[in-house]
Image: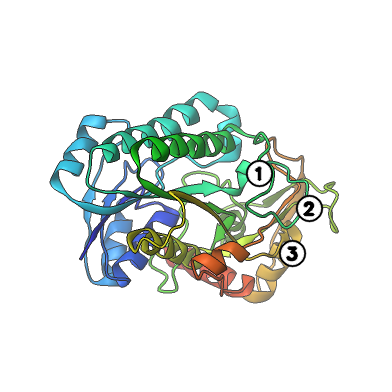
Amino acid sequence: MQKVLVTGGLGYIGSHTVVELYLEGYEPVIVDDLSNSELFILDRIGEIIKFKPTFYQINLLDEVAVAKIFAEHMFAGVIHFAAFKSVSESVQNPLLYYKNNLGSLINTLSLLENSNSNNFIFSSSCTVYGEADNLPINENALLKKPTSPYGKTKSMGEEIISDFITTYNKNAILLRYFNPIGAHKSGKIGELPLGVPNNLVPFITQTAARIRKELLVYGKDYPTKDGTAIRDYIYVCDLAKAHILALNRLINKKNTTNIEIYNIGTGKGNSVLEVIETFEKVTKTKLNYRFTDRRSGDVTAAYAEADLAKENLGFEAKTTLEEALKTAWDWQLSLK
């Protein structure tokens, strides 16, 4: 089995990608500092795939420690998830985000430079588009200045990778994905925010489970059909599979340029109220929610045009919003 390094591999998207990697015949090697994840997820991954991946509890800012991993293994590719990811937190603590997200990326690329591994998959984000002029958003859309330090680290990360790839003749695919939701259908892994959730769906499920007194809906005066913000909600296991398709493309030398960029989404936008109403319908659970002020850094609407990913990667989101929300609720109930 070819080995693949997965940074942030015990996090939300990383853990689901580790599962899909193994099922597709790869051996994942995980690096995670557990700053936004839990160690028991490693055992849960093992229960799902009947194999416990090699795991290193390391902060990627520790270049010496990461260098030892590259010395011990030969990787067919690297999938880089490790980053802080809260828009609101990044607004409150921008230096933390710049140091962690960019420093960890630079250290990983520095070690990739002198390794035998030539393939790099980057966890980017639709935040690099800022407030888009046209919807749906395609890969050729004008990149505006992101509205949050988190978004800026993704935009800067893409530029750093582009310069690196050009100089050192490596290959990379940047996956700009939209809003991942849901959990593995086994109910063993899912989104596990520390503290008060920053993302909508875990806030919904924790409110439904009465962990939170109420769900806060940030803004009811957006220029949308119901006044709430619109996003493209993609099922996390569909998203995870996109990473394997991207890696296969590089390993099999199907890429047409050294760096390729793909939107990963459903191609459909749903408002916050639509997600709430869908959750209530699917779970037959009434939510206690109220409106509050908009959050700094949030855009009005963002949803993908995902035709290029379908054409070149063979990727297509197949899971409905209803199905994804049901898995999120099952995951929440399992945590009780």
Please say if the residues under marks 1 and 2 sit with CB atoms less than 8 Å apart: no
Residue 294 spot, x, y in % from top left: 75, 40
Tag 3's secondary structure? Answer: helix
For label 3, the residue is 274
Q: CA distance from mark 2 to mark 3?
A: 9 Å
1 or 2: mark nearer the eye? 1
* Residue at x 35% of width, y 52% of height: 10
Q: Is residue 257 left or right of residue 247?
A: right
Residue at point 32%, 33% (across, down): 107
Query: Residue 129's mark?
Result: 1
Disc 1 to disc 3, C-alpha distance: 23 Å
**Is residue 86 visible to the viewer in this orientation of the structure?**
yes
- Say which label, 1 or 2, has the lower sequence index: 1
Above or below for 55 versus 22: above
Secondary structure of residue under mark 1: helix
The amino acid type of the residue labelled 2 equals Thr
Question: Residue placed farthest to the front in the image?
Answer: 256
Amino acid type of disc 1? Tyr
Instruction: Please name which of the two marks, 1 or 3, marks the residue nearer to the observer.
Output: 1
The dot on residue 228 is 2
